[in-house]
Amino acid sequence: MTDNLFDRLRRLLEARGPVNWGLAREIAESVAGPAEPVEPWLAEEFVDLTHAAARRVAAASPLDPVAGEVRALDRRTWAAQSVAGFTYLAEPLAAKMAGGLEGEADPFLQQLGPALVGMQMGSMAGFLSHRVLAGFDVGLPVDGAPPSFVVPNVAAFIADHDLDPQQSRLWLALHEAAHRAEVALPWVRRHLADLTGAFVDGLRPDPSGLQERLEALQDPEHLEGLLADPSALSGLVPGPESEQALRRLQAFMALLEGYAEWLVGRAAPGLIPEAPRLREAIDRRRAEPSPGEQMLQRMLGLDLQHHRYRRGTTFCEEVARRWGEQALSRLWEGPEALPTSAELDDPVGWAARILL
C-alpha cells in the first residue's frame, strides 16, 4: 500500500499545468461515490420543467435565461463535470503558491502546487456532490455549467421533508433558471473572478499549516488521509485584504441568491402552493454549512455565509416595494450598481447612490 501511495504521489507531481485537473476529477469521483442510475423519465421531466421555468423567468425580469442543455445527474457525474467550473478560484490559488506564499518563489510549492490545488478542488466538488440540489445551491457558482440537478439529493430532500415531488421539482427548476440567467451575464462572471482573486491574493502563510504539510509528506498514514481531505494542506489564512474581499464576495452572493428568490415569487405566483414549506426546508438545511462549505472554511477561511442569503431577498423586496420592480433592473447594469455589504442592509443608501 505504501509503495503504491508514493508511486501515486510521484505521478501527481509529474503533471503539467497550474492545476492538475485530471487529479481533481479523479478525487471528485472518488469522494462522490459510485455511479447511480438516473431514471430517463425523471431526467426528461427536469429538462421540460427547466425550459418552462426559463420562459417564466424571462417574462418576469430583464434577464435572459436561455436554458439550453439541462443536466439531471448522479453525484459522481455532477462532481466530475463540475470541478473545472471552479477554475476562477483554483487558478489564483495556484498562482499564489507558485509565486511563493511570502512573495518569494518556493521550489517545493511550485512542484507540489498543481497537485495540491487539484486535490483541494476535487475534494471540495466531491463533498459538495453529497449535498447540493442544483447549481443555485452550491454556494460558489459553477462557471460555464448549464442548469444542473443532482437527482439523488433532490429525491432525499423531498423525502426528508415530506414535500410534493412535482411542486418541488418545479420550484427547483425556477431557482436554477433564475440563477443561470444571473451568472450568464459576462460581467457577473468577471466580477466573481475579480472578487475571488482579490480574496486569494490577500491570503497569508500559516506557519503551522506549512509545517503540517511538510510532515504529511513523510508520513504514509497521514498522507493517505490527506489525499481524501487535503483541506489542512493549504498553509494559508486570510489577511486584512482577504477579509475585505470576503465581505464584498458575501454581499455579492447574497444579492445573487436573494434576487433569484425574489424573482421566483414573481415568475410563478400561486403556481407552487408548497413554496413556503420549500423555503422553510431550505432555510433549515442551510443553517448548518455543508461538508463542502466546511472544507472551504478549513482550507482558505472562505466562509460564504450561505445561510444568510435572506439579506439579499429582503433587499430586493424592499427596493421593489419602495421604488418599484423596475428599480431592481438597475442591479444588472454592472458591478458599480451592486449594493455594498452595508447597503445590502440599507436599501435607502443604495437607492440614494444609484436611483437618485
Image (tube, rainbow, N blue to C red):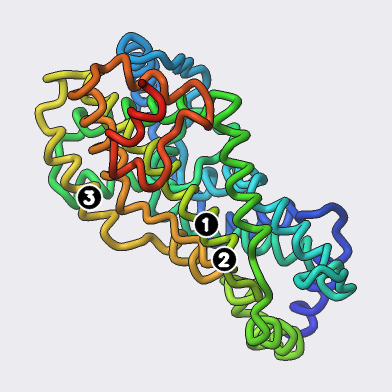
The image quarter containing residue 326 is top left
Q: What residue does disc 2 label?
A: 240
Disc nearer the start of the sequence (2/3): 2
Marks 2 and 1: CB-CB under 8 Å?
Answer: yes
The image quarter containing residue 150 is top left
Q: Work out whether residue 5 or residue 240 is closer to the camera in this orientation and state it.
A: 240
Q: Is residue 16 left or right of residue 59?
A: right
Q: Is residue 233 left or right of residue 36?
A: right
Amino acid type assigned to the residue bearing label 1 in the image: Gln
Report if residue 250 is visible in the image. yes
Q: Work out whether residue 315 or residue 5 is closer to the camera in this orientation and state it.
A: 315
Q: What residue does disc 1 label?
A: 244
- Secondary structure at numbered mark 1: helix
Disc nearer the start of the sequence (3/1): 1
Q: What residue does disc 3 label?
A: 283
- Secondary structure at numbered mark 3: helix
The image quarter containing residue 345 is top left
Alpha carbon of mark 3 to alpha carbon of mark 1: how far?
26 Å
Q: Is residue 111 left or right of residue 294?
A: right
**Coordinates of residue 216 in the picture (x, y in percent):** 69, 85
Q: Quadrant of the C terminus?
A: top left
- Secondary structure at numbered mark 2: helix
Report if residue 1 is visible in the image. no
Q: Work out whether residue 264 or residue 119 is closer to the camera in this orientation and state it.
A: 264
**Residue at 12 percent of width and 33 percent of height:** 274
